[in-house]
Image: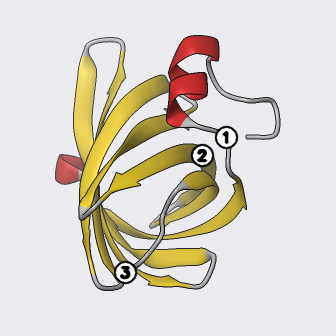
Amino acid sequence: MSDLNGAWKVQIRFVRGAAEHSMQLEQSGDEIRGGYRSQYGARELRGSVSGGNVQLRVPVHYESVGTTYSFSGQLDGDVLRGKVDLGEYGTGTWEAQRVGSVSYTHLRAHETPEHL
């Protein structure tokens, strides 16, 4: 079974540009929950894993505008990569590198660890 627990540094490539985000994942069986931080703030994420196939969803809001980032990808060691659907804002590709093992409970209680 895949192990997705830990802190991840996320690179997203859009049609026009790129962004660096972070996430903290906790896996229980095939269910994933965690925290996601972007330039728009911190949000809760949910997802699932089946073998090496990963699905993650996180609502992203800025002022009165919002969408859901829907990530699909594959786990290869300490790297996740795949496609992200940004709703009405198009699609992109993403890659995440595992950078640590801080718990999601710590993330929620104390915001994002400095190394994220």
Q: Looking at the rendered structure, which numbered label has been put on residue 21?
A: 2
Instruction: Give how far across and how far down residue 48 sits, in percent.
Output: 23, 61
Residue at 51% across, 61% down: 16
Picture residue at 36% right of the left edge, 84% below the top: 52
Q: In this orientation, which residue lies closer to the viewer: 4 or 16?
A: 4
Which element type, helix, strand or loop, lies under badge 3? loop
Using the numbered discs, state the Cα–Cα distance from disc 3 to disc 1 in whole angstroms. Answer: 20 Å
Mark closer to the observer (1, 2):
1
Q: Position of residue 93 (x, y in %)?
A: 44, 73
Indicate the secondary structure of the residue bearing disc 2. strand
Q: Amino acid at mark 3?
A: Met
> Which numbered marker is on residue 102?
1
Estimate the x, y position of residue 12 in percent, counting from the top left. 53, 61
Label 3 neighbourhood size at 10 Å, few (<14), some (14-19), many (20+)?
few
Q: Are marks 3 and 1 in contact (CB under 8 Å)?
A: no
N-terminal label among 1 and 2 = 2
Res. 90 visible in picture: no
Give above or below for 24 relative to 92: above
Mark 3 sits on what residue?
1
Q: Quadrant of residue 95?
A: bottom right
Q: CA distance from mark 3 to mark 2?
A: 26 Å
Residue 71 location in percent, x, y? 32, 62
Instruction: Decide which of 84, 108 is in the foreground and name it.
Output: 108
| Residue 81 in sight | yes
Please tell me how crowded label 2 is: few (under 14), some (14-19), or many (20+) other residues with Cα within 10 Å: some
State which tag comes first along the sequence, 3 or 2: 3
